[in-house]
Image (spheres, rainbow, N blue to C red):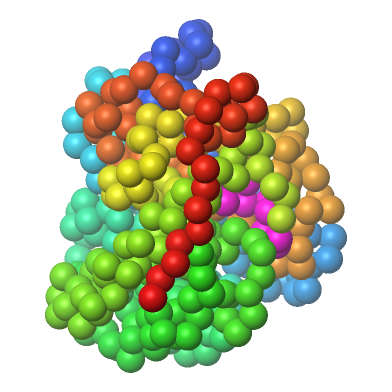
Amino acid sequence: MCLMLCFGSTVYAQKKKSATPSNDRQLWLNHLDKVARPVLSNLAEDKLKQNMPVVLSDRIDNKGSRTRVAYLEAFGRVMSGIGPWLNLEGGAAAEVALRNQYRQWALKAVANAVNPSAKDYMQWNGGQPLVDASFLALGLVRCPWLWENLEPQVQEQVITAFRTTRSTVPVYSNWILFTGMIETFFCKYGIEYDAVRIEYGLREFTQHWYVGDGMYSDGMQFALDYYNSYVIQPYLVAILEVVNSKNKSFQWYTPRLDKITRRYAEIQERLINADGSFPVLGRSIAYRAGAFQHLADQALRQQLPESLKPEQVRGALTAVIRKTLEAPGTYTKDGWLNIGLYGQQADLAEFYITTGSLYLCATAFLPLGLPETNEFWAKPAAPWTAAKVWNGQDAPADHALELR
């Protein structure tokens, strides 16, 4: 079976090199493969620490600690993005073969990441490990297939690793959702969980930190950045979905959150310029296309506002993916991401940015979890708001969301 899977993946790679992508889905798969392959294939072979270069911000605050956690950063962030695609069934033969290869890599990668005897066993205690353990937990929430197909011993080691993060007190910001996401993973899969850690994060955001027009503050202060998309709204939606499926304790907030997430999706779509660029605002801008995780997540969930057609969102996200992942200097000669937004731009890195951090860009690929027959993929591409307006076409005016 392995030979067949590897052969299928090789054929897919050869087709990529020999022909221009025939459609947007193939283009997205090409980019997913280019981003994720070095991380997953090496970790599956227990060689991620051996082969992944760790470049640190020039302003790094703790070189040793940041280097050690960079591997979990890369792994957790890739999994949070490709989870829905791994969970999908069916499709074109080449895509199925590629997905089967990634499934096998993912099973082995998880096993090595949580096995204390493996070379690639990862660091699970500390501040940054809490962050990236939560991204891995989100990936597992988004991909039941992966969790259900792990060996029982590996499942127990995952549980042990995630429980290790409980000793870390989160920063009073979006970090409270990181602890909440790990407990949400436990909740989803019938494992004993701490409801207070979930409740705390949800109540701070739902009752104290909504600031209006579809956006939350990141703690006590509002910042004009992309953290509503990097973390806040995708996490809130995922946590509420799981919690409400179990005990409906936050069902009262679902209608309000639905209005907020749809409005923020509108804002995100309008931030994407006609050429796929977007405002260079706020910290963590080196996450590239990950700035639009929320828009991608809403498309995956088929919860876009009526003002946004799925095919225009596909056009907008395709433009962002191409703009941020096709620029010269985006990758090293060995295929690892360089720090930057458009190519290699070291000065864009904050004190916490490492090579591993950059892989949050994988969350732009979330709609690949929809089958190719879904209207997001099946309908002809349509221009997004900026592409229409800056080419002289008419478009509806924008209006703020008023919640009472």
Q: Quadrant of the C terminus?
A: bottom left
On whether residue 395 falls in the magenta region, the answer is: no
Residue 255 figure quarter: bottom left
Q: In this view of the protein, which residue sits in the foreground, 267 or 5? A: 267
On whether residue 284 falls in the magenta region, the answer is: yes
Q: In this view of the protein, which residue sits in the foreground, 31 or 53? A: 31
Residue occupying image coordinates x 50% and y 11%:
20
**What residue range appears in magenta?**
282-294
Q: Is residue 272 above or below residue 230?
A: above
Q: In this view of the protein, which residue sits in the foreground, 243 or 280? A: 280
Residue occupying image coordinates x 43% and y 31%:
312
Residue 227 x, y percent position in the rendering: 57, 64
Q: Is residue 399 above or below residue 248?
A: above
Q: In this view of the protein, which residue sits in the foreground, 381 or 82? A: 381
Residue 25, can we see it? yes
Task: Count numbered badges in the picture.
Answer: 0
Magenta span dominant secondary structure: helix
Residue occupying image coordinates x 40% and y 71%:
403
Q: Is residue 328 above or below residue 278?
A: above
Question: Viewed as shown, does residue 199 lie left or right of 317?
Answer: left
Residue 352 figure quarter: bottom right
Residue 18 x, y percent position in the rendering: 50, 8
Question: Viewed as shown, does residue 282 lie left or right of 162?
Answer: right
Residue occupying image coordinates x 66% and y 43%:
278
Q: Quadrant of the N terminus?
A: top left
Question: Viewed as shown, does residue 198 lie left or right of 130?
Answer: left
